[in-house]
Image: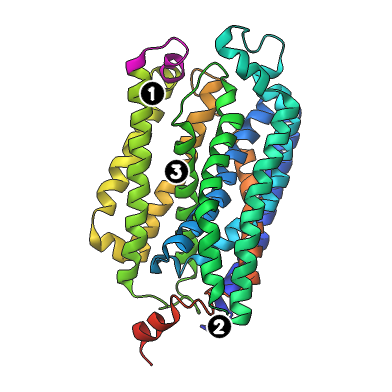
Amino acid sequence: MNGPDTARAQLSRRQTPVLLVGIVGLILWIVAGHGSQQFFRSYLVAFLFWAAIPLGCLGVLMLHHLTGGWWGYPIRRLLEAGSRTLRWTAVLFLPVLFGVPKLYSWTQPGGISNDWVNSFKAAYLQSGFFIARAVCYFAIWLALAYFLNKWSAEQDRTNDPRLAARMSALSGPGLILWGLTITAAAIDWVMSLEPHWFSTIYGMIWMLIAVLAGLCLVILVLRLLSDFEPLKDCVEPSRYIDLGNIMLTFVLLWTYLSFDQLLIIWAGNMKDEIPWYTHRVFGGWAPVAVALIVLHFFVPFFLLLQRTMKRRLRALSAVAALLFLVSFVDVYWLVAPSYDTSPHPHWLDLFAVIGVGGVWLAAFLSELKKWPLLPLHDPRFEGELVHEHGD
């Protein structure tokens, strides 16, 4: 069974079970913890991780349109499908809004001291302003995803070569807006969990978490569908080296920025900054920090240095699976110590991440089925595809 609809059939077979698992996870999350603080804390971690994926897909999609690299051809439709799920991600954000009073200490009287350093934070961290900013972030993300997908669909339908230039022109300023809004969202949704702490590098770290999570998931889905038409044999194995090199680049950037933030804060030795790290690199959280160093940097770094590893999609997807799982651990390590000075995993954490993940993955698979799995008339690749596959 290798007909042109085989890949779509694979997606259909997985969509319903994934959705059912997600619904069961959400039901268990609601029944087991409704109204408690842990109820909202577990959901926040789950939401932040799964929301990072469509944002990462949007960022990588704009990077592809801006650079025109061939590496984006086999994953472009996967990235577009991920970006279209942002409207469902906005719906999944609603429980976070309902849980603001239980998640963020600044909502309580005296949550932020009134000294001159924190006077701006006190004015900035207001529930109404918090919600208004969130609406602005999603509006920008949805607008970028809408136009990129709209023009991509028009390109398939009309074969208009000007649309590629239009998507590229949007992606330049779009990436700037993407970076600024992710930085602001990371400050609002995560950094403000500890409102007396701040870092100017923090937003960039979340950008890289999003890009790695989105890119890794897309590579895993590409591997799932690579045995079926139209993705079967659509690219030579050497082409996957580019995807591996991009993964390696983002791993190195994540490592550089994470170490840079630690070095600056540790050297500064400021009483409002140091506790954020002492909670995370000593005591019960220390093994998690060590695991991140080993599994988020050393292991993927040495694996992705090997050319043979990057030529084989199966091996590359194994590295992607590792980085995808470690990205969740990274999100958990950034968020959970804001509440607990030592790790206390809870069943609600598992229920929330499975519930949100199942619903989001079902939406992703639904979007992916709607369009052809390869761009039909992108002028940047049509000639090269003829050369690559001959007649």
Residue 355 in sight: no
**Picture quarter with the C terminus:** bottom left
**Label ID, residue 286:** 1
Relative side of 141 to 320, left or right? right
Q: Position of residue 263 (x, y in %)?
A: 32, 24
* Label 2 SS: loop
* Label 1 SS: helix
Q: Is residue 159 above or below residue 126?
A: below
Residue 182 in sight: yes
* Label 3 SS: helix
**Marks 3 and 2, how far apart at CA:** 35 Å
Residue placed most toward the observer, 329 or 59: 59
Q: Position of residue 71 (x, y in %)?
A: 39, 66
Q: Residue at x 46, y 28 (%)?
A: 200
- Residue that label 2 marks: 4
Q: Is residue 42 above or below residue 361?
A: above
Relative side of 187 to 359, left or right? left
Q: Residue at x 37, y 53 (%)?
A: 247
**Marks 2 and 1, how far apart at CA:** 50 Å
Q: Are marks 1 and 3 in contact (CB under 8 Å)?
A: no
Q: Are marks 3 and 2 in contact (CB under 8 Å)?
A: no
Relative side of 309 to 325, left or right? left
Q: Residue at x 32, y 56 (%)?
A: 245
- Residue that label 3 marks: 208
Q: Which residues are magenta?
A: 267-278
Numbered marks: total: 3
Q: Position of residue 14 (x, y in %)?
A: 61, 63
